[in-house]
């Protein structure tokens, strides 16, 4: 699974991410009080699919090399 759950402090409802620890490009997806992070591929396409205002799926299409 490419998405990893991030912890949200329930007492303050804050999300803290140390960007100095992360290397490369990342996307953080927030939906219904949940937060997930994923590393973006160096090439290709990443789609976040929503339905009725909620995130349903994250699709990674890295294509094919010829």
Image (cartoon, rainbow, N blue to C red):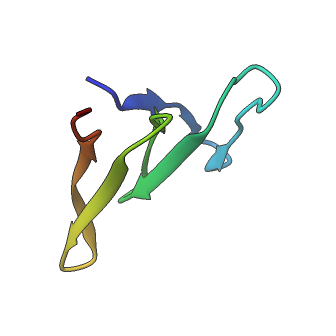
**Can residue 10 be seen in this snapshot?**
no
Q: Quadrant of the C terminus?
A: top left
Q: Quadrant of residue 16?
A: top right
Q: Which one is in front, 1 or 64?
A: 64
Q: Can you name the residue that lies furthest to the bottom here?
A: 52
Q: Position of residue 59 (x, y in %)?
A: 23, 48
Q: Position of residue 62 (x, y in %)?
A: 29, 39
Q: Residue at x 69, y 23 (%)?
A: 23
Left or right of 18 on screen, residue 50: left
Q: Which one is in front, 24 or 51?
A: 24
**Can residue 8 be seen in this snapshot?**
yes
How many circles with numbers are drawn on the protein? 0
Left or right of 26 on screen, residue 52: left
Q: Quadrant of the N terminus?
A: top left
Decide: is 62 above or below 54: above
Q: Position of residue 34 (x, y in %)?
A: 40, 47
Q: Residue at x 63, y 42 (%)?
A: 11
Q: Can you name the residue that lies furthest to the right here?
A: 20
Q: Position of residue 52 (x, y in %)?
A: 18, 80
Q: Residue at x 30, y 58 (%)?
A: 47
Left or right of 66 on screen, residue 24: right
Q: Can you name the residue that lies furthest to the front here?
A: 66
Q: Residue at x 45, y 55 (%)?
A: 30
Q: Which one is in front, 33 or 39?
A: 39
Left or right of 37 on screen, residue 57: left
């Amino acid at each position: 699974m490419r998405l990893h759950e991030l912890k949200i402090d329930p007492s303050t409802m804050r999300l803290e991410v140390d960007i100095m620890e992360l290397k490369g490009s990342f996307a953080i997806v927030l939906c219904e009080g949940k937060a997930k992070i994923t590393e973006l591929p160096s090439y290709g396409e990443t789609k976040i699919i929503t339905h009725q205002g909620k995130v349903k799926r994250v699709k990674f299409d890295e294509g094919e090399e010829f």
